[in-house]
């Protein structure tokens, strides 16, 4: 039976004798070596951490399990979040399984189809606001001041605690930290969490080194790179369409302490990496997730030499979340009569 993040890493988590050890089967995701891009890009070793293999299809389950367990421990009956989609998919799954009410505030028009389908089917109370993610988060912050409901966005420190388990898993699998960790940056909770995880394992003597943290925002919402809040963030990578990252300062600290980089990639670069991952590695991720690989490609094109380095790219979410984007850039399949000759004709096999 899958242990889950709380049972597996309880010594590193805020678990007390009163914390319920709940799980939906999160964590323990595949960490696979590149088959093609490693050579084509000239990396020493290149790995992908497939966080889309979590139960609700993104890394959000790792943090949510701790946030929800601590909310239950404190007696909460309801949880609330602002979400670009995956947080609500995760929160509503935990709420459904453990008998809580979930309330999710999402921005109008920018939540991928699969994520909305999850939250609806799992019984969340969903309010779609006529505004963006940052405004949704402001509303949630104000609501939890007035009502007895636990906030499960990544400004809840328990989310960061759970998400750092992905860094533990990478070290547990590789035997040490990689040289570089490439990761998409939206609200910057995840880069904060990985850095915390790598530091803790290093301090505990489990790893001998710490990676350089390489975070990538989408250019149209690259607040950290530009050094200013972006009022109207834009990108087709909706999971990182965030103009005022909640963990801004901690992402900058992760970059500086690790001698890393926070950069940006364009939507074209994101889509190019998204297609490469699918076509060359068999990894179908959501667009935001491809920002990590897009960042790696951009750095290598810019002259970074990684020919003797070990690189891990975090693939944050599953491509099935966002079929609209996939189909909008795909070539439509051929349509044939139900006839072997016609099919052979299309295949050029006659
Ligand atoms: C939430 C999310 C991100 C961004 O993570 P942050 O912690 O907000 O930086 C990236 N990709 C996917 C698929 C996500 O769900």
Image (cartoon, rainbow, N blue to C red):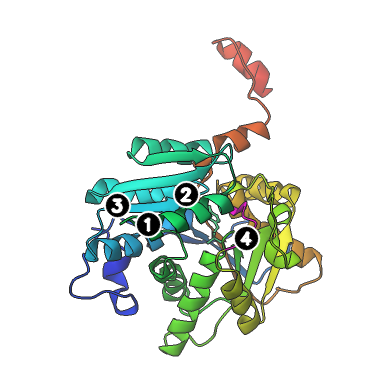
193 w.r.t. 125: above or below: below
* Residue 66 quadrant: bottom left
How crowded pointer 2 is (Cα within 10 Å; few <14, some 14-19, many 20+) is rated as many
Counting residues from the start of the chain, the first of labels 4 and 2 encountered is: 2
Q: Position of residue 278 (x, y in %)?
A: 60, 46
Front residue (pair 125, 203):
125
Residue where numbered disc 1 is placed: 146
184 w.r.t. 191: above or below: above
Residue 78, label in figure = 3
Quadrant of the frame with the C terminus: top right
Residue 77, label in figure = none
171 w.r.t. 234: above or below: below
How crowded pointer 4 is (Cα within 10 Å; few <14, some 14-19, many 20+) is rated as many
Is any part of residue 37 visible from this angle?
no
Q: Position of residue 237 (x, y in %)?
A: 63, 48
Residue at 67% x, 16% y is 345
Quadrant of the frame with the N terminus: bottom left
Residue at 68% x, 66% y is 224
Counting residues from the start of the chain, the first of labels 3 and 1 encountered is: 3
Residue contact between numbered discs 2 and 1, judged by CB atoms under 8 Å: no
Magenta stretch: includes residue 242: yes
Counting residues from the start of the chain, the first of labels 3 and 2 encountered is: 3
Residue 244, label in figure = 4
Residue at 47% x, 65% y is 155
Q: Nearer the viewer, mark 1 or mark 4?
A: 1
- Spatial CA distance of label 3 from label 2 is 18 Å
Counting residues from the start of the chain, the first of labels 2 and 1 encountered is: 2
Secondary structure, mark 2, is helix
How crowded pointer 1 is (Cα within 10 Å; few <14, some 14-19, many 20+) is rated as few
Secondary structure, mark 3, is strand
Residue where numbered disc 2 is placed: 86
- Spatial CA distance of label 2 from label 1 is 25 Å
């Amino acid at each position: 039976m899958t242990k889950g993040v709380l049972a597996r890493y309880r010594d590193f988590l805020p678990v007390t004798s009163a914390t319920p050890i709940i799980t939906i089967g999160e964590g323990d995701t595949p960490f696979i070596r590149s088959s093609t891009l490693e050579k084509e890009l000239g990396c020493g070793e290149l790995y992908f951490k497939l966080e889309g293999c979590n139960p609700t299809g993104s890394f959000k389950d790792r943090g949510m399990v701790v946030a929800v367990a601590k909310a239950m421990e404190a007696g909460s009956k309801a949880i609330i979040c602002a979400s670009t989609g995956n947080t609500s998919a995760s929160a509503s799954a935990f709420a459904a399984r453990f008998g809580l009410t979930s309330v999710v505030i999402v921005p109008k028009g920018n939540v991928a189809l699969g994520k909305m389908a999850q939250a609806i089917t799992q019984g969340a109370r969903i309010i779609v606001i006529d505004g963006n993610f940052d405004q949704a988060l402001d509303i949630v912050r104000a609501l939890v001041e007035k009502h007895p409901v636990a906030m499960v966005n990544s400004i809840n420190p328990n989310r960061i605690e759970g998400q750092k388990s992905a860094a533990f898993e990478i070290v547990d699998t590789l035997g040490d930290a990689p040289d570089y960790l490439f990761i998409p940056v939206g609200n910057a909770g995840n880069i904060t969490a990985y850095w915390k995880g790598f530091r803790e394992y290093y301090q505990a003597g489990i790893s001998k080194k710490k990676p350089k943290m390489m975070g990538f925002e989408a250019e149209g919402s690259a607040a950290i790179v530009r050094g200013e809040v972006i009022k109207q963030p834009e990108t087709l990578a909706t999971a990182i369409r965030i103009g005022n990252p909640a963990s801004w300062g901690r992402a900058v600290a992760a970059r500086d302490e690790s001698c890393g980089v926070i950069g940006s990639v364009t939507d074209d670069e994101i889509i190019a990496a998204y297609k490469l991952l699918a076509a060359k590695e068999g990894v179908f991720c959501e667009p935001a997730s491809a920002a990590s690989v897009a960042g790696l490609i951009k750095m290598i094109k810019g002259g970074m030499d990684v020919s003797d380095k070990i690189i891990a790219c975090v693939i944050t979410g599953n491509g099935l979340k966002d079929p609209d984007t996939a189909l909008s850039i795909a070539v439509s399949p051929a349509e044939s009569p139900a006839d072997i000759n016609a099919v052979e004709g299309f295949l050029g096999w006659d």
